[in-house]
Amino acid sequence: VIGISRIGDLRAVGPIKKLLSDEYEDVQEAAVAALSILKAGISSDELIKMIGSRNPVLRKNAVLVLGEIGAVKAVPAIGFALKDDNIKVRHAVVRALSMIRTDESIKYLTLALTDENADIRVSAALSIGLIKREGISESLVLLLTDTDDAVRAAAVKALGELGDKTTVRQLIKLLSDRSGFVVTTAIESLSRIGGETARNALVEMLSSHDNEIKRTAIKALAPFNDVESIILPYLNDPDWAIRMAAVEVLCARVFAAGGSVRVELEKLLDKEEDPVVRKAMEECLDA
């Protein structure tokens, strides 16, 4: 199907459109991809009508094609499909809106953040995180108190992608979340956003009793200046993964802090028992 579309013969559009409701999902996906290539011969009006079909498979794939071809005029019809009873259709709506990326499509994406299905809220949040628009963070902040762990994590990640410094204090609150995954995601997002407030919060997380959180916090401090003295003690941590994280961060600063980083690595090299950490130290010192 895709091979035929690459020839560019617009006569193939009609037969390929019929495959949008094929019983096999891989055939449907191939048809969507093919029609996105042949977009010059596609009537968006016809696809918009398909969104009203009784067949959920056809509704889903019509929405996807409209997104792939960037059909701006179809945004209201696509957005209306957020009310569709079929979850796959609503997933397709989020994907299509994120591809079109107009102000109107973004408004509908923010509506998807209130969907009853957590997976769709996750998808909408992650999609919004990839769109750099002023003021878009506000809708994501509301999800930081969502009852679903994955939704909160998605909102946190999206805010990190946006890099909005006004959300730092809200993200810091998530450092005490009940979900370890949300906490580590918040650490990573604070690292991306940066700033003194974020840095101080990350340093505090080094005292966590959870080794994964501690390891993530060490790596999250990599973009910040003057953290060598803070990270050096973790070269002696009992957990090999934490020592490895410290080596990775400090290796880029081997001549920093008056050469103390290199001196400390050389001193600990012979004592290091883990072969992976030891090799990382050797490579760092030989660089």
Image (cartoon, rainbow, N blue to C red):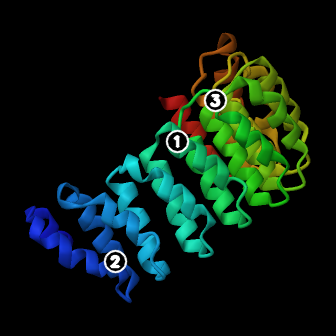
Q: Nearer the viewer, residue 78 or 146?
A: 78
- For this orientation, the residue located farthest to the bottom is 23
* Spatial CA span between label 2 and label 3: 39 Å
The span from disc 1 to disc 3 (Cα, nearest Å) is 22 Å
Examine the rendered structure and indicate whether residue 18 appears above or below residue 33: below
The secondary element bearing badge 3 is classed as loop
Front tag of 2 and 3: 2
Image quadrant containing the N terminus: bottom left
Q: Is residue 111 above or below residue 6?
A: above
Label whose residue precedes the other's in the sequence (1 or 3)? 1
Q: Secondary structure at mark 1?
A: helix
Which residue is drawn at the image coordinates 19% and 79% (left, top)?
A: 15
The residue drawn where x is 73% and y is 35% is 138
**Residue 104: image tag:** 1
Q: CA distance from mark 1 to mark 2?
A: 26 Å
In this rendering, position of residue 140 left or right of residue 106: right
Taking depth in this image into account, of 50 and 208 the one nearest to the observer is 50
Circles 1 and 2: CB atoms closer than 8 Å: no
Q: Can you identify the residue that label 3 sits on?
A: 163
The amino acid sitting under disc 2 is Leu
N-term mark: 2 or 3: 2
Mark 2 residue crowding within 10 angstroms, few (<14) / some (14–19) / many (20+): many
For disc 3, the neighbor class at 10 Å (few under 14, some 14 to 19, many from 20) is many
